[in-house]
Image (cartoon, rainbow, N blue to C red):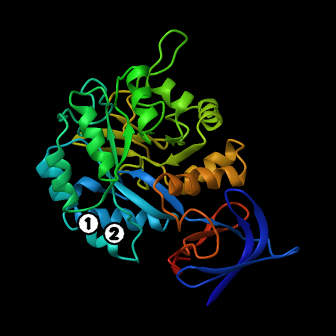
Amino acid sequence: MNSIKGKIINYNESFNGEIFFSNKIEKIHKEDKGEDNFIIIPGYIDLHCHGGAGFDTMQGYDSIKKMSDFHLINGTTTLLPTTWTSKFDHIKKALHGVSKLVEDTTNNIEGIHLEGPFINPNKLGAQPALTQLPSNEFIENILQIVNIKVITLAPEIEGMNEFIKFLISKKIQVQFGHTLADFKTSNEYLSKYPIGFTHLYNAMSGHTSRESGVLSSALLNGKYAEIICDKNHVSREAIKIAHKCIPGLYAVSDAISSTGLADGMYNFAGVVVEKKNNKVCLQDSNILAGSAITMHETFKNLIDMNFSFEEAVRMTSYNASKYLKLDNLGALEKNYLSNFIVMDKNLNLLKIFLNGELVSE
């Protein structure tokens, strides 16, 4: 059995202590005056990530493995590689064999997030114009390849009522995004199903003094929603408002393949994007094309926004674990998997453990 001492930070408390662990946490000993040179937090859980280090989910098995490795050494111990809107054959080819990575305990992949293709063609953002109408067959065929944990869709699309029922029956978490639905449409589904929201505020019908859309529904009645905290997609004040309104708000990276690379021109979803000053936009425009941030940078941004350490942990691991019903992840507690991060007082990553194994030092 291994052990590590430091300032242990959970979603609900912080204390000095020592964690005794194998592949799972065997026990935690609290100390009145323990070491606090090290900060220990749960490993990050990222439920929306397209790529990193030059690799993209849509490039297939090898790229998915390499992008997951990149995010693992940056503290993400649970990851959902995320597709973008494309034709079925492309998505199927990209995800072929990924179930092997899900089953591999040395890997951080939990399943996949389908972002599209069942979204509104008039609210694409940086997504390709390859949307389609709901298809049970599409989902059934993908499920034969890999477990779909989350799907982003637009509820106003024709045929969505029966489709959402079908997805819920398959235990797939439904999120509204890239949508122009009105408040009533969103809220009716929210009253019946555990609906989440994709990159809250972005690519969805909004909220003004006279018009109420999907954002209004999320802020008023949402229990869970993902949000990008890269200081580009959403303002500090808007993040604070969402945090006040939505109890299960959790951060995602929405990272694309240029994450971790130098500024310059890159390809994303078949178009040219420019990365500059940690911001990625479609070429010659101000349209954001995903982010260039890791979850560790997200955590540091939240602390910089004056969220407490406990709140930052809640938003980078705990809430996402509860949303996906991952009952042994997202906290530092006895019998939870030994997925945790060790940092110094300046929040520099020192060690990362996945299932009790040291993956970075």
Report the residue marked by disc 2: 102
The label number, if any, that marks residue 267 in the structure image: none
Q: Residue at x 33, y 66 (%)?
A: 66
Count of numbered circles on the image: 2
Residue 228, percent from left and from top = 50, 41
Nearest the camera: 133 or 123?
Answer: 133
Q: Residue furthest left?
A: 89
Q: Residues within 10 Å of mark 2 (few under 14, many from 20)?
A: some
Q: Residue at x 58, y 31 (%)?
A: 235
Say above or below: 57 vs 301.
below
Q: Which residue occupies 28% across, 36% down? A: 127
Residue 190 visible in image: yes
Q: Dot 1: what SS?
A: helix
> x%, y% of residue 289?
36, 38
Residue 273, picture quadrant: top left
Report which residue position mark 1 lands on.
98
Q: Is residue 268 visible?
A: no
Q: What residue do we see at 48% from left, 58% from top?
A: 325
Q: Hey, what amino acid is under mark 1? A: Val
Measuring from the top left, give residue 89's x and y in whole percent.
11, 51
Residue contact between numbered discs 1 and 2, judged by CB atoms under 8 Å: yes
- The quarter of the picture where residue 229 lies is top right
The vertical placement of 161 against 17, above or below, is above
- Res 32 quadrant in image: bottom right
